[in-house]
Image (tube, rainbow, N blue to C red):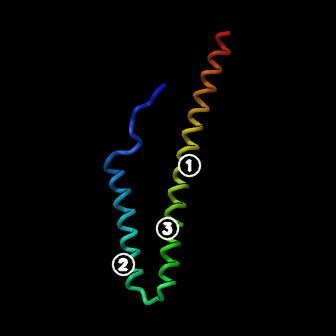
């Protein structure tokens, strides 16, 4: 059974990218105006990148696990139908 549908609307996708860009932009503006040494600013940029990657990976793993649960449920349903017909 193939499902051909988009999970998110184009407006939601745009909002997600816009929010990411606005957050990064505001963070960099704040960091530029901060009264810190260059190595301190570099530390904050590295932490921001680590948090962004962590958020993306967490979202992907959660989505993949949900998809796997759906696939396993479908397989069990098909197996039960086959065993009932025997």
- Residue 77: give x, y in percent of width and height: 61, 24
Q: CA distance from mark 1 to mark 3?
A: 20 Å
On screen, residue 48 versus residue 23, left or right, reads right
Q: Earlier in the sequence, mark 3 or mark 2?
A: 2
- Residue 17: give x, y in percent of width and height: 36, 58
Quarter of the view holding residue 4: top left
What residue is shown at x 39% (from left), y 68% (from top)? 23
Q: Earlier in the sequence, mark 1 or mark 3?
A: 3
Q: Which mark is residue 62?
A: 1
Q: CA distance from mark 1 to mark 2?
A: 32 Å
Question: Which quarter shows the C terminus?
Answer: top right
Give the label, 1 or 2, closer to the camera. 2
- Check the image and report above or below for 45 versus 55: below
Q: Residues within 10 Å of mark 1 (few under 14, many from 20)?
A: few
Give the label, 1 or 3, closer to the camera. 3
Which element is circle 3 on? helix
Q: Are marks 1 and 2 in contact (CB under 8 Å)?
A: no
What residue is shown at x 56% (from left), y 42% (from top)? 66
Q: Which mark is residue 29?
A: 2
What residue is shown at x 53% (from left), y 46% (from top)? 63
Which element is circle 2 on? helix
On screen, residue 42 versus residue 18, left or right, reads right
Q: Are marks 1 and 3 in contact (CB under 8 Å)?
A: no
What residue is shown at x 62% (from left), y 17% (from top)? 81
Q: Which mark is residue 82?
A: none
- Residue 78: give x, y in percent of width and height: 60, 21
Q: Nearer the viewer, residue 66 or 42?
A: 42
Q: Earlier in the sequence, mark 1 or mark 2?
A: 2
- Check the image and report above or below for 77 versus 19: above
Q: Which mark is residue 49?
A: 3
Q: CA distance from mark 3 to mark 2?
A: 15 Å
Which element is circle 1 on? helix
């Amino acid at each position: 059974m193939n499902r051909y549908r988009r999970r998110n609307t184009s407006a939601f996708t745009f909002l997600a990218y816009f929010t990411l860009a606005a957050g990064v932009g505001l963070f960099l503006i704040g960091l530029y105006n901060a009264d810190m040494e260059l190595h301190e600013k570099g530390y904050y940029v590295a932490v921001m990148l680590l948090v962004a990657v962590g958020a993306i990976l967490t979202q992907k793993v959660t989505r993949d696990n949900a998809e796997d649960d759906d696939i396993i449920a479908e397989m069990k349903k098909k197996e039960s139908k086959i065993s009932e017909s025997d």
